[in-house]
Amino acid sequence: MKIHQVSVFLENKPGRLRAACAELAAHGLSIVTLSLADTEQFGILRLIVEDWQKAKTTLEKAGYVVKITEVLAIEVDDKPGGLARILDTASGAGLNIEYMYAFAEKRGGKAVLVFRFEDPDAALRVLKDGGINVLENVKLFRLT
Amino acid sequence: MNAMECHPLSAPDFMPLSALNETRLRRLQVIVTRAYDRVKLFRQRMEERDLRPQDIRCLEDIRKLPFTVKTDLRDTYPYGLFASEMRDVVRLHASSGTTGKPIVVGYTREDVAVWTEVIARCLAACGLHAGDIVQNAYGYGLFTGGLGLHYGAEALGATVIPISGGNTERQITVLKDFGVTAICCTPSYFLHLLDQGASLGADFRQLPLRVGVFGAEPWTQAMRERIEAESRIKAYDIYGLSEIIGPGVAIECARQDGLHVFEDHFLAEIVDPETLEPLPDGSEGELVLTTLSKQAMPMIRYRTRDITALMAEPCPCGRTIRRMRRISRRSDDMLIIRGVNVFPSQIEAALLRVEGTLPHYQIVLTREADLDQMEVQVEVTPQVFSDEVRVLEELQRKLLHSIETITGIRAAIRLVAPKTIPRSEGKAKRVIDKRKL
C-alpha cells in the first residue's frame, strides 16, 4: 500500500529547516523519517509523518507550500544484495525511481526504504508480485 | 566657444532666437498638417477637439493639441502612426514594448539626414571633430543607439569603429591599439570597461581617449565624477528616445550643465504629469516632445515620462537652443536595465505565460561589476510546487526563458517561499532598485 509523504518548499537559508520542524513539534507531530533535497537556492523537505493530514494543514496554516506525494515503504533485507534485489525487480519491470531514502530505524533486522516511483501503482503491483514486502502503513514501522 | 569654432552643421545651435522661433512655428504648422492628413489616430483626436491644422497660429497653440503616449504606438503596431508610404521609408528600428510586441519606428531618407545632422551637432558640442577616432560601442541593430551615432560621427568627419556592444576584452584591445579618442556607450558599460581594463592592465589615463558620449540610461553626477577621475576623459550625457528619433534629441556642451535640446527639430514642453498642465521654464515636470521635421513618423506632444526641467537662461557656450536638466527620474514605472527599457508589466506577462496564474513576484535590481543585474524573485505556489528538484529547476528555466523572450534581458530567477515578498496594503512592492544612481 502506498503511504503519504509530506513535501515542503524551503528556501536555502539558515533556520528554515528548524522553523518547519518546530512548527510540527508545536502541534505534537513526530517525524518518522525525512530527507532533504537541496539546490543552491532552495530545498525540498520530504517528511514521513503518521498524521500526514494534520501535518499538511499545520504547515499550510503556517504559510508553507506543501505537496502530498504517494511513496512506497519497502522492507529490505539488511544484508549484501538486499537492495539490489528490489532494484532488479523494479528495473526489470521498467519502473522509474525518482528518489529514495532510508528510515533511521530497523524493523526486525530489516531496513526500510522510502521509494518515490514515477508510477507508484504499477510499482506496488510489480513489487508485491515479486514477493517484496511493501509496508501497509506508517504505524507498522514504528518501534513503539 | 562660438559658432565659428564649431562644425558648420552646428550653425543652428547658435541661431538668433527670433529666427529659431520662426523656423519652429513654420515647421510645427507643416508637421501638424502632415500628421492630420496622413495619420488616422491623430486626425480623429483633432476632430474630437474640433481642431484644424490652421488653428496652430503661434507656438503656444501647441497646447491645444492632443498628447501621444507609448501605448498609441503599441495599439497601432506596427505602422499605424506612419505618415509616409512604405516605399519612402528607408529604415526601421524597434524597441521593446509593454506586452512583448516591439514598438516600431520608421525613417525616410530625409529623417535619416536629420538624425545624422543632430548627432553630428551632438558630437561637435562634446568637442569632437574630423580626425577623431570614435569607438561606437552602442548596440547595432534594431536598437537606435548604434546606427544613430554611426552616421552622425561619419558626417562630422570622424573615423568610426562600429564595434557594437559586448565582447569586453576586444573593446579594451581596440581602445588601446586603435588610437581611439572618443567612445560612445552606456555609462554603466564604460564603468565595466574601466574595471575590466584595470584587471587587464589597461590604464585609460595613459590612452589618447579624451571624450565619452554616454546615454541610453539615467546616470548621475557622482558617476560622471568617478568616470572622469578614473579615465581622465570628459564624460557627456546624450539624450534621446526611439519614438522621437533615437539618440540626438539633446546633448551636453563643454559646460556640462544641462543638455541642449535641438529645438529646431524637437519642440520641448514640460507638463505636470498628473494634470498635464504646461509648466513654466525652471519647473520640474514631464518632458513632452514634438518632432518638428520628422516625415515618416511625426510625433505630436509625445509624453516621454522622463522628469526634467527646461532652463531658459542662456548658456555661456553661446548656444541659443535651450537646455534641459539631466533626467532625474521617470513618471511611470519603466526601468532601464543595461540600456533596455523594461516595464514590470512585461515581467508579469512573462510569469503569467509560464505559470498560468500570476504569482507574487519582486524585481531586484543590483549593479555588479558596474553591470545591471536583474533578479526576479517568484513565490512558489501549491500549483507549481513539486517534490522533485528537477521539476522546480525546469520551472526556473522556463521563467528565465520567458522573461528573456519578452524583455531581451537575461534575469536570474529565485524561487522563494510564499508570503516572503513584503506586501504593503495588500499591494506588493514590485521593484527593489539597489543600483546606486
Image: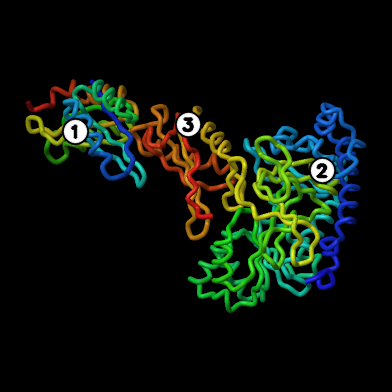
Q: Report the residue marked by disc 3.
A: B427
The residue indicated by pointer 2 is: B298
The quarter of the image holding the C terminus of chain A is top left
The quadrant in which residue A130 appears is: top left
The Cα atoms of the two marked residues, 3 and 2, are separated by 38 Å
Alpha carbon separation for disc pair 3 and 1? 39 Å
Q: Which residue occupies the foreground of this view, B28 or B215?
A: B28
Q: Is residue A113 left or right of residue A122?
A: left
| Mark 3: amino acid | Lys
The structure residue drawn at horizontal position 59% and vertical position 67%, both measured from the top left corner, is: B170
Contact check, label 3 and label 2, Cβ < 8 Å: no
Residue on which the image places disc 1: A33
Question: For the point 58% across and 40% down, which residue is it?
Answer: B333
Answer above or below: position of B297 versus B206. Answer: above
> What kind of residue is marked 2?
Pro
Dot 1: what SS? strand
Q: Residue furthest bottom?
A: B206
Comparing marks 3 and 1, which lies closer to the viewer? 3
